[in-house]
């Protein structure tokens, strides 16, 4: 699979066109971001761990009959995926209280969250990823 021009460089991944118009390469970098990209640091091997973890999750979904973007692993830090139309939302699952949740609710950092909390955000850094719920769909 031939990697072609860069399509998008996000805070943690770079997306490339390939010689197949239906497929993209996702490259998972070591960049680690906080505060909507204001702070970026390098964590050695993070790209590899995210790439392999993502592949593992996608495989689990496929095995339960849920189709995913995944085609195959290409290297430690790259995966081949189907080119899809993206819906700009982010789902966050929290097992422990940290970051914005602590500020928002005033609860103790590190508190175990059982069952985990499920948060839904609009993926938009300039708006600081505002929280949304199902009733926002028509906006
Ligand atoms: N399978 C795909 N098909 C089409 N576009 C994709 C696909 N996967 C990712 N993209 C595009 O690449 C962008 C970057 O992916 P992603 O958001 O996962 O990376 P990121 O580095 O975390 O970016 P960000 O800084 O925006 O959070 C997505 O917003 C989307 O536009
Ligand atoms: Mg991101």
Image (cartoon, grey):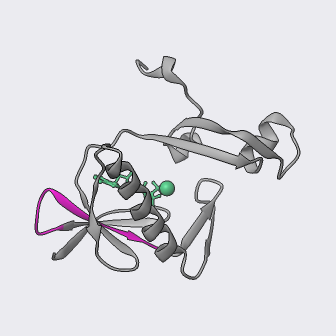
Instruction: Find the residue positioned furthest to the bottom.
Output: 44
Q: Which residue is depicted at the point 56% across and 41% down?
A: 129
Q: From the viewer's perspective, tell me whether residue 21 is left or right of residue 27.
A: left
> In terms of depth relative to the viewer, which is nearer, 45 or 36?
45
Residue 29 to residue 61: above or below: below
Residue name at image x 81 percent, y 34 percent = 105
Tell whether 40 sits left or right of 138: right
The front one of 22 and 73 is: 73
Q: Toward which corner of the image does residue 85 lie, by quadrant?
A: top left
The N terminus: image quadrant: bottom left
Q: Quadrant of ligand 1?
A: bottom left
The residue closer to the viewer here, 79 or 61, is: 61
When asked about the image quadrant of residue 92, the answer is top right
Establish if 100 lies above or below 39. Answer: above
Q: Position of residue 102 (x, y in %)?
A: 80, 43
Does the magenta portion include 20? Answer: yes
State the quadrant of the C terminus.
Answer: top left
Check the image and report above or below for 57 versus 139: below
Report the side of 106 relative to 132 (left or right): right
Residue 42 lies within the magenta run: no
Report the residue that reaches farthest toward the front. 64
Residue found 54% across the figure and 45% down from its top: 126
The magenta stretch is 18-29
Q: Residue at x 29, y 53 (%)?
A: 69
Residue 125, position in %: x, y? 53, 47
Q: What residue occupies the far left of the structure in this picture?
A: 20
């Amino acid at each position: 699979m031939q990697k072609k021009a860069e399509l998008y460089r996000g805070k943690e991944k770079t997306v490339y066109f390939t010689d197949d118009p239906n497929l993209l390469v996702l490259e998972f970098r070591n960049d680690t971001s906080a505060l909507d990209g204001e702070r970026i640091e390098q964590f050695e091997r993070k790209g590899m761990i995210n790439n392999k973890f993502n592949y593992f999750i996608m495989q689990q979904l496929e095995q339960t009959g849920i189709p995913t973007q995944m085609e195959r692993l290409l290297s430690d830090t790259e995966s081949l995926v189907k080119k899809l139309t993206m819906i700009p939302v982010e789902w966050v699952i929290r097992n422990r209280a940290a970051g914005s949740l602590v500020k928002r609710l005033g609860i103790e950092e590190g508190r175990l969250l059982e069952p985990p909390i499920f948060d839904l955000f609009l993926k938009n850094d300039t708006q600081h990823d505002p929280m949304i719920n199902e009733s926002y769909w028509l906006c």
